[in-house]
Amino acid sequence: MDTPAVSIENLDKYLDGKQILFDINLSIRAGEAFGFLWPNGAGKTTTMKVILGLIRPDSGSVKIFGDPSLSNKTKEKIGFMPENTYLYKYLTGREFLRFNGKFFQIPDDELDEKIEEILHKVGLDSAADKLLWKYSKGMLQRIGLGQAIINTPSIVFLDEPMSGLDPIGRKMVKDLILELKSKGTTVFFNTHILSDVESICDAFAIIHQWHLVANDLVKNLQKPLEEYFIEKIHENTEGEFEIV
């Protein structure tokens, strides 16, 4: 059996004495697009931080490509775009991408070529030499996505990548995610836009009040995802939670 891109087993997390993740179990196949769905305050950001090693679980295990220690070799395979992208406002878009590319010791000639390719993919060719503080929210989202793929990652984590984008920007990001998937890149993204999951993802999970309440393939849905999502939230808002 192929090694999953992400494997989470029996994950629990406490914060200030309160349990905020309960027995999370997920297996994400390499090369698939995976949508992580949530209502507000569900625990999705905490889950992503644990996966990326930014915070430690209290029990359970997380593996990325079979590596439980998140070694530097594994980190080199990861791209990440946080929900709130804090950027160096006095760098230009091109300088920002070069700054991030240097972390991966990409040769200068290769990096220059990659930067131009990414600027084109995210629609920022004409804004490449503009300072980031002059970028709109949507432009910042797109340059943030660009830095997440500067190292040609094997897996990329995107926290609400469509937030703040106009329809053209949304289409551009969706096309880029589909392109990444077509090349074998695993894409894990948090979102509350259900139509994006239906049109992009192979699999999805729903987290609600710190419990995983659904985990399935998109093709297995027997009803619209919106209807399914609301049903699962209602089922699991009162009484005991059941892992699906």
Image (cartoon, rainbow, N blue to C red):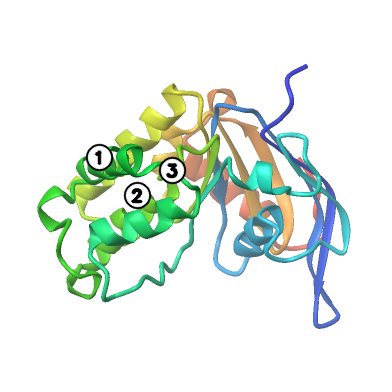
Residue 44 lies in what quarter of the image? Answer: bottom right
Residues under numbered marks 2 and 1 in contact, where contact means CB atoms less than 8 Å apart: yes
Which residue carries the number 3 mark? Answer: 106
Q: How many marks?
A: 3
Q: Amino acid at mark 3?
A: Ile
Disc nearer the start of the sequence (3/1): 3
Question: In the image, what residue type sits under mark 2?
Answer: Gly
Give the x, y percent position of residue 144. 36, 57
Q: Distance from label 2 to label 1 (Cα)?
A: 8 Å
Pointer 2 with pointer 3, Cβ within 8 A: no
Name the foreground residue: 211 vs 14: 14
The type of residue carrying mark 1 is Lys
Which numbered disc covers residue 121? 1
| Outermost residue to the front | 108
Which residue is located at x 50 percent, y 43 percent? 227
Q: Nearer the viewer, mark 3 or mark 1?
A: 3
Residue 35: give x, y in percent of width and height. Answer: 53, 42
**Which secondary structure, mark 1?**
helix
- Asked whether 228 or 220 is in front, the reply is 220
Q: Residue furthest bottom?
A: 16
Residue 65 visible in rendering: yes
Q: Is residue 111 left or right of residue 166?
A: right
Mark 2 lies on a secondary structure that is helix
Identity of the residue drawn at 66% across and 58% down = 208
For disc 2, the marked residue is 146
* Residue at disc 3, secondary structure: loop
Q: Earlier in the sequence, mark 2 or mark 1?
A: 1
Tell me the distance, in whole angstroms, between the alpha carbons under discs 2 and 3. 15 Å
